[in-house]
Amino acid sequence: MLKELRAKLDNKEISAVQLTQHYLDAIKIKNPALNAYVNVTSDYALAAAAAADEVIAAGKQTMLTGIPYAVKDIYCVQGIESTGASNILKGYKPPYTATVIKRLPGAVLLGKTNSDEFAMGASTENSCFGPTLNPYDPTRVAGGSSGGSAAAVAADLAVFSFGSDTGGSVRQPASFCGIVGLRPTYGRISRYGVMPMASSMDTVGPFAKTVEDLALLLEQVAGFDPKDGVTSQQPVEQYSATVNQPVEKLRIGIVKEYFELEGLDPAIRQLTERVINQLATLGAEIVPLSLPHTKYAVPAYYVIVPSEVSSNLARFDGIRYGYRAPETADLLDVYTRSREQGFGDEAKRRIMIGTYALSAGYYDAYYAKAMKVRTLIRQDFVAAFKQVDVLLAPPCPGIAFKLGEKSDPIQMYLEDVFAAPASLAGLPGLVVPAGQVNQLPVGVQIMGPQLSEALILRVGRMIEGLPGQ
């Protein structure tokens, strides 16, 4: 899609302003019901599009010049309200812009998309703006936490978008909304200017309609950034140059624990197995594997993540920026009332769990033990990738669920059961549409070793080309 739009813009079949206005008009019609966008930056977008047309006229355009896109509301953009979908940051306009956005020269930002508060959730129901609805069925969620970004692309309200993935927040919404989504290797893309949740696992990643578009986007935004100390200094590959090359002698690992997990929808299992069989007919070798510590991934994840949430959200104290409660008695009252009134239920829940897990007398019993389990999970993957090139699994246990269906926090946390293991190990994961169950889209997840984005994109492109996709 990106290449086609690039050609139309370059051949003057359409201007960047006309293309941007087309998307703004679509947002005006569809977004009131969908709630994918929480802040549509129309004037900003049209000004950027006009500037893009001047660049195109001068013949100095790049791949993304004049292409409209959206970003999750945890991305900071200088002078544009960036709330993290939390009441505690309502009205906040950052003095700086995220590195990812700066690495999209000439692209046109349409606005900020909905999210679970500070990316905490799997349904976008924890947003202070209300939930995003699934474009395929408005009674169901679009997924989370990057549900708004996924729904915007699926509903043709942006050409591409960016979300974040800590424990599945790109991969699960991509599956629910029938598009492609990439969680890159931890450290492959800078997170500078993106509001943190769990800093040892947070990644930012793109959504698009095709794997080829993801490859083009990853080329633009990946790479070292001195403002994010964990970014890799490994050279960025030309992903788009190799994405259409078939993978010779591909070895695909099938993890038995993933297919034995309680709660996996049999229809999802059947669809995933169909994709595996189709790849086998193309010559791929299917290798059964065991990742024995898989069952501990979600418990470990939900000790480590709240602990880091507790630390990261400590900055919101009602003093430096964000919401400050009125009519407070003293400094302690400012802290407690501002946080009580500004944070939603899930943020408070994670702060309390994390503070408890890090407290004296409990640190060794919970956080330190969870980190040891994380090491074991990482070692499982290292051993697996000595035998296979990639792993293939469902991205989530079922189809998009009904709004309000998972009111129990534990039920919601189990949405991460197929995504959390790779997150704990810092691995890349790509979700590609694989078909439908009950007329709702379902994807498959491809995981690879660290910095294997070129390989998993090629495998994803192969899956896109299978019959029935």
Image (cartoon, rainbow, N blue to C red):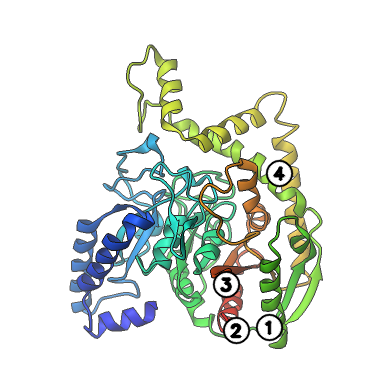
SS of the residue at dot 1?
Answer: helix
Q: Nearer the viewer, mark 2 or mark 4?
A: 2
Report, in whole angstroms, how far the alpha carbon at label 1 lies from the one at label 2.
Answer: 7 Å
Camera sees residue 343 = yes
Report, in whole angstroms, how far the alpha carbon at label 2 lies from the one at label 3.
Answer: 14 Å
- Residue 436 numbered tag: 3
Other residues around mark 3 within 10 Å, as few (<14) / some (14–19) / many (≥20): some
Quadrant in the picture for residue 330: top left
Q: Which residue is mark 4?
A: 299
Report, in whole angstroms, how far the alpha carbon at label 4 lies from the one at label 3.
Answer: 30 Å
- Residue 466 numbered tag: 2
- Whether 318 is drawn above or below 244: the answer is above
Q: Do the residues under discs 4 and 3 have CB atoms within 8 angstroms?
A: no
Residue 231 screen position, x and y as percent: 52, 56
SS of the residue at dot 4?
Answer: helix
Q: Quadrant of the N terminus?
A: bottom left
SS of the residue at dot 2?
Answer: loop
Residue 355 screen position, x and y as percent: 60, 29
Label located before the other in sequence (3 or 1):
1
Quadrant in the picture for residue 129: top left
Q: Which residue is mark 1?
A: 278
Q: Nearer the viewer, mark 4 or mark 1?
A: 1
Q: Nearer the viewer, mark 2 or mark 3?
A: 3
SS of the residue at dot 3?
Answer: strand
Other residues around mark 4 within 10 Å, as few (<14) / some (14–19) / many (≥20): some
Report, in whole angstroms, how far the alpha carbon at label 4 lies from the one at label 1.
Answer: 34 Å
Q: Do the residues under discs 1 and 2 have CB atoms within 8 angstroms?
A: yes
